Amino acid sequence: MRVSKTDLGRLVPIGQGGFGNVFRVDYRLPGDPALAYKEFISHQADLASSAAAAVGLRENLSLYDREDLDRYAAWPRALVYDTRGAVSGFLMPVVPQDFFCRLDTGSGGIEPRPREMSWLTATSDRRKAAGIDLRDVTRTERLIVLAQLVRTIALLHRHGWVFGDISSKNVVFKIDPPLIMLLDCDSAAPLSDLSRRQPSTPFWLPPELSGQPPSQSLQDDATDVYKLGLAIVRCLLPGPGATTTSYPGRLAGQLDAEGIGLVTRALSDDRSERPSARELYDYLDRAVSARPRRAAGTSAPRADSPAAPFPVKVFLCHSSSDKRVVRELRSRLLSDDIQPWLDEEDILPGQDWDLAIRKAIRESDIVLVCLSKASISKVGYIQREIRHVLDVADEQPEGTIFLIPVRLEPCEVPDRLRRWQWVDLFEERGYQRLLRALQGHGRARQLSSAPRRQGRRGALGRRGNGPGASAGRMGPARSSGGHGERTSLDN
């Protein structure tokens, strides 16, 4: 997309660097939130070429991959042209306010600063001394943040791109729910560009780039994976020396033998030993899903403390049109030690789509049915899936929660779901009400010595009381094995 600099309106300075200045602008692109304009001040031709390639990559991605990239990265959106017709810079998303923290400047003032991932290496004492308003980040939240980072790099690798300057300074995050944003994305480059010259942050250099002389000059998939290994080693467990360590043994007690083995391989001097970013992501995602749930009414476990058993298994029913909201719900549930089942994460390549979903519904403790104006108008596969959910719900003992309809926005609840009490996630305390029902189910399991039953109903999802809807699986769904990007609520 071609944007004229004269159309940007007023330029409000918000940052500067060695190669460009960044301004907030009022200009908007379709479907994008607030935007920033990065204007080149040196090496214009090279930077313009890199930005054009980055914009082109995004435009050529599938809708699914583009939404994934937009969610986790401040990726260049459009080129900006000056009055001579030359590329003067590009547009990218502004970092949202919930990725900022308040930091003591040391001179008696408090300023908002981006919450860089480097703060995950800091102990509580160091954070207190720095005057940053950042609470203890749990082990599960750290795993989610790292998994999102690795997932984004794996996406780039799948399309033949290398990020290059991976470091804790180039990733900002929030924790309610956990979400990252990858910064300085204009330095990423396609592997096919043999003239690429990408920066590297001090103390993040792989051995092949740091030798005298280095054994190679170009960064690639393997150098990215080495830096991902450093991010895991440094950010999963805070402590002295965490900002520069490359010792995977410090993760003992944080990861199992498989995880430590993968990170050890990622940090190997032998490039051929390093796993792919996808392998790292698959492990981290399994580790997140397997985190035990903390007992209801107790505080979240710190990164160095054990967690409670009996994670509540929740099936997320969703439409592709609700993908962004559903992913955020999944992250929030994971951070609260609930174990959500999401088809795009949990259906393996080659598995039968319909059988996998039916099996997941029956093995779940609770099903959440995600409802929106768009999803309730769907026909086809959604109707068949809801029928199966209702069949399983009818098998559950009376008075227990199994099915909870979750409205993402004001919308009608289908008649056949109205006998179940629904929850409005868009209301201020909607998520807390949902979490209370899920945690109540987990508490009942912990207190009971009887064999575990398939499902429970209670304050939410109770049959026969008040307005209701059925619960299901919230989350974007992408199947493998020929189903393309169909979701559980799609045709």
Image (cartoon, grey):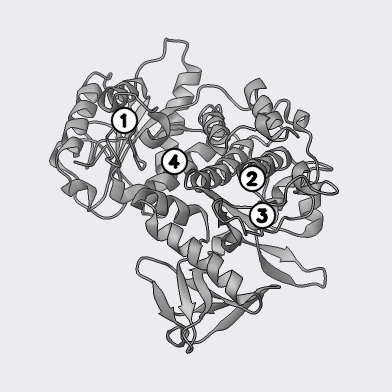
Dividing the picture into quarters, in which one does residue 143 lie?
Answer: top right
Image vertical order of residue 114 relative to residue 341, above or below: below
Asked whether, in this view, residue 370 is left or right of residue 275, the answer is left
- The amino acid sitting under disc 3 is Asp
Q: Distance between the Cα atoms at labels 3 and 4?
A: 29 Å
Q: Secondary structure at mark 4?
A: helix
- The amino acid sitting under disc 1 is Gly
Foreground pick, 479 / 375: 479
Foreground pick, 243 / 483: 483
**What residue sits right under mark 4 in the picture?**
330
Q: Secondary structure at mark 3?
A: loop
- The amino acid sitting under disc 4 is Arg
Asked whether, in this view, residue 377 is left or right of residue 242, the answer is left
The x, y position of residue 441, in whole percent, is 42, 27
Foreground pick, 299 / 62: 62
Q: Distance between the Cα atoms at labels 1 and 3?
A: 34 Å
Q: Nearer the viewer, mark 4 or mark 2?
A: 2
**What residue sits right under mark 2 in the picture?**
224
Q: Which mark is residue 481?
A: 1
